[in-house]
Every structure is written in C-alpha cells, then in structure tokens.
C-alpha cells in the first residue's frame, strides 16, 4: 500500500476547490482533477474513495477551519453589540483572507452537500452562538425572534457586501469597493434594527 504524500494531498485539495469554483459541482470530475494535478486518476483513489468522498472531506475539514475562525476571540458572555461586532469582524476577515474558499462554500450551500458541510462546523459554533443568544435575550438586549429572522437581519447584509466586493460591482452594475466606513455603517444599521 502506498503512503499518502501530504504535499500531493494539499495539491489535490487546492485544485479541487479551484475547479469547483470555476466550473461548479456539475462540471467537476476526478478526471479533470487528475489532469489539473498532473497525476493519474488512480492516484486520487489512494486518497479518496470517490468524488463525493473528496468533496465531503474537503467540506468538513475546511468548514471546521471556517467555524474556528468565526468564533475566534468570541465570548458568549459579550454584550450584544460587542459580540455581533466580533462576529462581523471574524466573518469578514475570514472571507477576505479566503475568497476562493468563500466561493467554494457558496457552491456547497446550494447543493446536496449542504447538510454535511453545515454540520462540519455548526456543532461547536451552535453551542457558542446559542449561549450568546440566550444571554442577550435574558439581558433584554434584543427581542425573541425566529432564528431565520435574526440571521437575515444580522448577517445577510454582511454577506451581500462581501458578494459585491468579490464581484467588484453593486447590483446596479456600478463599481463597488468595500471600505471600513461602508462595513461599519452597515453594521450600525443592523444593530439599530435588532437592539431594543
């Protein structure tokens, strides 16, 4: 049995992510990946059982890294505005530092891999964020609301700004460049909408 080459595994992961971002999940195959890595298809099967195994392993590993980044220096005891600001900062920093991963995760979010991808980082993240939400509600900082409503108000504006930044234009087709002023002005509006 051949031993795994960690450099080759990293190359395979990197090329798989790049191909999925460029061609979508439907345009991704093990043959294309092998060609992009200049290795044989048989070599891929040393590392991964099949295409699904490859995609899921990358999703789980990278999702865990993203989850860790999202709760870095975050304390569920923080006051609402402080905690939400840390969440925005962490998410923004992660997505700016990892634009290809952000696009890769977008592909997964609209696929049959979504559930496994989300569960790869949601376990710890949900515990921390659940405790944070319980605390801010108990302190009366925000109203009780369905999670989907909270998330849509709290984070959708951030993700839309990042999408505009990645695309280099707004929905109207005007050039767009993210600035700290835009980021934190939007954040202030979100806090104003959610705080009691």
Image: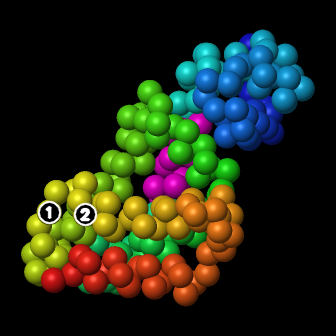
Q: Residue at x 16, y 68 (%)?
A: 134
Give the residue at the far front of this rendering.
172
Query: What x and y, as percent, mark residue 14?
Result: 74, 41
Magenta stretch holds residue 194: no
**Between disc 2 and disc 1, whose residue precedes?**
1
- Give above or below for 73 relative to 115: below
- Nearer to us in this view, 182 or 41: 182
Task: List the residue tagged with mark 2.
Answer: 150
Magenta stretch holds residue 59: yes
Give the residue at the far right of this rendering.
38
**Image quadrant in which you'd find residue 99:** bottom right
**Label 1's element?**
loop
- Give above or below for 183 relative to 21: below
Q: Is residue 190 left or right of residue 169?
A: left
**Image quadrant in which you'd find residue 96:** bottom right
Q: Residue at x 61, y 24 (%)?
A: 26
Q: Residue at x 23, y 59 (%)?
A: 149
Q: Measure the C-alpha gap from mark 2 to mark 1.
A: 7 Å
Query: What x and y, as percent, mark residue 169?
Result: 65, 64
Q: Residue at x 49, y 49 (%)?
A: 64
Task: List the residue tagged with mark 1.
Answer: 145
Magenta region: 58-68
Query: What x and y, as percent, mark residue 116?
Result: 42, 34
Query: What x and y, as percent, mark residue 33?
Result: 77, 25
**Given contact means CB atoms under 8 Å apart, are the residues at marks 2 and 1 in contact?**
yes
């Amino acid at each position: 049995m051949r031993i795994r080459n960690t450099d080759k595994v990293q190359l395979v992961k990197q090329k798989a992510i790049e191909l999925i971002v460029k061609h979508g999940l439907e345009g991704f195959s093990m043959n294309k990946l092998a060609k992009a890595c200049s290795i044989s298809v048989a070599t891929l099967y040393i590392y991964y059982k099949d295409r699904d195994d490859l995609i899921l392993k990358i999703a789980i590993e990278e999702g865990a890294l993203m989850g860790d980044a999202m709760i870095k220096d975050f304390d569920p005891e923080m006051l609402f505005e402080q905690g939400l600001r840390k969440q925005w900062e962490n998410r923004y920093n992660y997505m700016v530092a990892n634009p290809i991963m952000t696009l890769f995760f977008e592909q997964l979010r609209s696929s049959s891999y979504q559930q496994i991808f989300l569960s790869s980082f949601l376990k710890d993240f949900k515990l921390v964020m659940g405790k944070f939400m319980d605390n801010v509600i108990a302190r009366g900082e925000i109203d009780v609301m369905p999670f989907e409503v909270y998330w849509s108000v709290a984070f959708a504006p951030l993700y839309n700004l990042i999408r505009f930044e990645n695309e280099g234009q707004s929905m109207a087709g005007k050039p767009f460049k993210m600035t700290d002023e835009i980021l934190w002005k939007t954040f202030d509006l979100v806090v104003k909408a959610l705080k009691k």
